[in-house]
Amino acid sequence: MKDLETTGPIIRVRNLKRDFRVGSRGKGKGVLRAVNDASFDVMPGETLGVVGESGSGKSTIGRMLVGLLPATGGEIELFGETITGSHGKRALAKVRHRLQFVFQDPHAAMNPRMRISDVIAEPIDIQGGWSRKDRADRVAELLELVGLSASFADRFPHEFSGGQRQRIVIARALALDPDFIVCDEAVAALDVSMQAQVINLLMDLQDRLGLSYLFIAHDLAVVRAVSTRIAVLYAGEIVELAEKRELYENPKHPYTQALLAAIPRPEVSSRKPPIRGEVPSILDRPDGCTLCPRCPMAFDRCRTAAPALREVAPGHRVACHLYDGD
Ligand SMILES: Nc1ncnc2c1ncn2[C@@H]1O[C@H](COP(=O)(O)OP(=O)(O)OP(=O)(O)O)[C@@H](O)[C@H]1O
């Protein structure tokens, strides 16, 4: 277990925004706010799950957190360094080795002509300064850490199954001994039994190495299996954030309730009606709550004022006017 020097959050995100310019001329041109005012912390050793439909901004948040994409507003503090704003680049350089990213598709994530040793050692080679022996020893250690034989180092990616390739990608992510890993749909490309194995590996590594994860997934069963707390995203906004158990047993936001109603849950007998319709165009945000056009519970205020994310119980935050008076 790492000796993390802080007991407070390792990551603090406040009012994070990301705009994209879309379209060229005429129709469809504008600014798309993919992430709007997201605020959350990540604690040492925890997994913050992030769920939401396709296009809700999950990957955009993940990429901003590891410095792959600049924010257009708000603040990201990683290990006490503010990587947004005017000194952001210098701050990011100080903490970059503590951050890693595991993408969805292990096939696309590696060059088919590279040997596994070179795939895994990519971050080591970028960092530089390693002797050949230390590099080879580290690759062998990493292969074993992810449950693969050290003898695989000289093989090529096509010799491995999807699950094994994802283990190799995880080994690469661990090469420089990070503290925080964004897992973006890290098991989505795998079949269910492989998913379970890779999830178990990630959780085992978390215990052994003291890692924290931001775990992005559209699959609520997967997020439930891994998360300590869960943030629910809708159209680029966090609409609910709570401890896993609290979120599943006592969902407050109509969108979270609809998401949970859509998966089979033996412990829940009555089901709320699902939310119908499509996610609205985030090119043209409504004045009020973004969910309002689809929400079965909407009332007047929902059409005119955007609800803030407020604490409705200890550690349980919801952005919904239904709880304004609580
Ligand atoms: N580089 C870009 N240029 C323009 N728009 C972008 C860009 N990257 C993302 N977007 C838009 O931002 C919004 C959020 O995308 P994002 O990929 O973060 O969503 P997501 O929740 O991860 O979706 P998925 O589950 O499908 O990966 C989408 O509307 C997407 O089209």
Image (tube, rainbow, N blue to C red):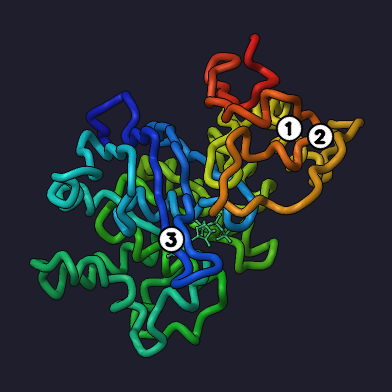
Q: Compared to 1, does 31 lie above or below? A: below
In-front residue for pair 289/244: 289
Q: State the residue position of label 2.
A: 296
- Ranked by sequence position, the earlier of labels 3 and 1 is 3
Residue occupying the far front of the picture: 26
Residue lying at 44% horizontally and 45% vertically, measured from the top left: 213
Residue type highlighted by circle 1 = Pro
Q: State the residue position of label 3.
A: 102
- Ranked by sequence position, the earlier of labels 2 and 3 is 3
Residue occupying the far right of the picture: 269
Q: State the residue position of label 1.
A: 254
In-front residue for pair 225/146: 225
Q: Compared to 175, does 77 lie above or below? A: above
Residue type highlighted by circle 2 = Pro
| Quarter of image, res 45 | top left
Q: Secondary structure at mark 2?
A: loop
Q: Residues within 10 Å of mark 2 (few under 14, many from 20)?
A: some
